[in-house]
Image (cartoon, rainbow, N blue to C red):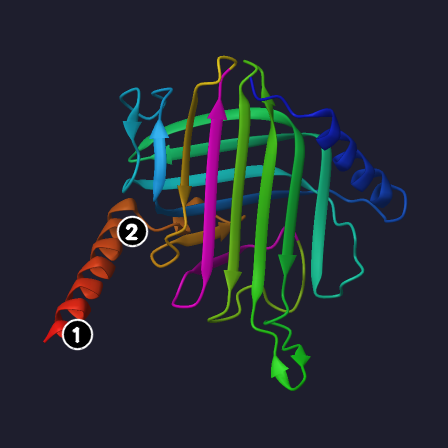
Amino acid sequence: MKKVSTFAKSIFASAYLATAFSLPAYATEFSYTSTGIITIGTDSLGIFGQTGESLVGNVFSLTTSFDATPADLTNPNEIRSYGFSSPFAVSATVNGVTYSTQATFSTFALINNTLSAGIQNSGVPYPYDEAYSTAAGNDSADNFVFTYQYLFAHSSPFVGTSLDFGSNLSFAAKVGDSILNNFVLQNSAGEKTSFYSDLSLGSFVQINGSSSNVPEPASVVLFGFGLLALATSRREAAKK
């Protein structure tokens, strides 16, 4: 089974201790939801349907929730949270079938508003707002659970001028943006269900707020098909 290593524990412990005694601590419930289309994935555990079925091309929604405490405040345009021995909740939905679990070990969150704040770098605006969440640990059934969710926004600001893990933020990816998502559930026998998505266009991120703001799966699929059709038409036009 994929256990969290002693080395990894020491790294997270060091980061946690370095910040816990130097900053005022206040925890905020933080929830990161991503919606998009899976580009790599297999359901070896059968949690979303048939055991061993490919998940490629399916619509997904992934939510990771935990308490976030601001730390490492050296950058005025960025807040981070390091959690050690921290509980977290995960809910993953693929084509309408949902798997939810709770686990404990490490969590990390980051929000950066450099684009929203209009920070200048040699006269050129620094080109991104950023949101990032990751969590790893073991659940009550001793399954290893891992999530990674990342948004790098170049096209337009979405964070705003204030930084708060409790803020309600939403973003639909456009050309030039980067959204990555990864989900892993591995049992004690080493069998796992996992999926990964790097198809940024058509992806949507909701931080906190209501899940009703997340697009319906059908609209995500239609958008994805639209992108494929556009790419095909451009290729055919280029051949003429």
Region of the chain picked out in magenta, as a range: 165-187
Q: Can you tell which mark lies on residue 90?
A: none
Considering the numbered disc 2 on the image, is that residue within a helix, a strand or a loop?
A: helix
Name the residue: 41% across, 54% down.
204
Q: Nearer the viewer, residue 16 or 3?
A: 3
Q: Nearer the viewer, residue 176 or 31?
A: 176
Does residue 38 appear in this view? no
Q: Where is residue 202 in the image (x, y as percent from the top left)?
A: 33, 56
Q: Which residue is the extreme one toward the right?
A: 21
Q: Which of marks 1 and 2 is nearer the N terminus?
A: 2
Name the residue: 35% across, 59% down.
201
Name the residue: 34% across, 20% down.
46
Name the residue: 54% across, 32% down.
146
Whether label 1 touches label 2, CB < 8 Å: no
**Residue annotated with mark 2:** 220
On screen, residue 93 versus residue 80, left or right, reads left
Q: Distance between the residues labelled 1 and 2?
A: 27 Å
Q: Which residue is the extreme one toward the bottom?
A: 123
Does residue 78 appear in this view? yes
Report the amino acid beneath label 1. Ala
Q: In this view, does 56 lie above or below 237?
A: above
Q: Where is residue 87 in the image (x, y as percent from the top left)?
A: 65, 29
Q: Can you tell which mark lies on residue 238?
A: 1
Q: Nearer the viewer, mark 1 or mark 2?
A: 1
Q: Label 2: few (<14), some or many (≥20) within 10 Å?
A: many
Q: Where is residue 102 in the image (x, y as percent from the top left)?
A: 56, 25
On screen, residue 118 versus residue 85, left or right, reads left
Whether 55 is among the magenta residues is no
Q: Is residue 130 above or below residue 190?
A: below
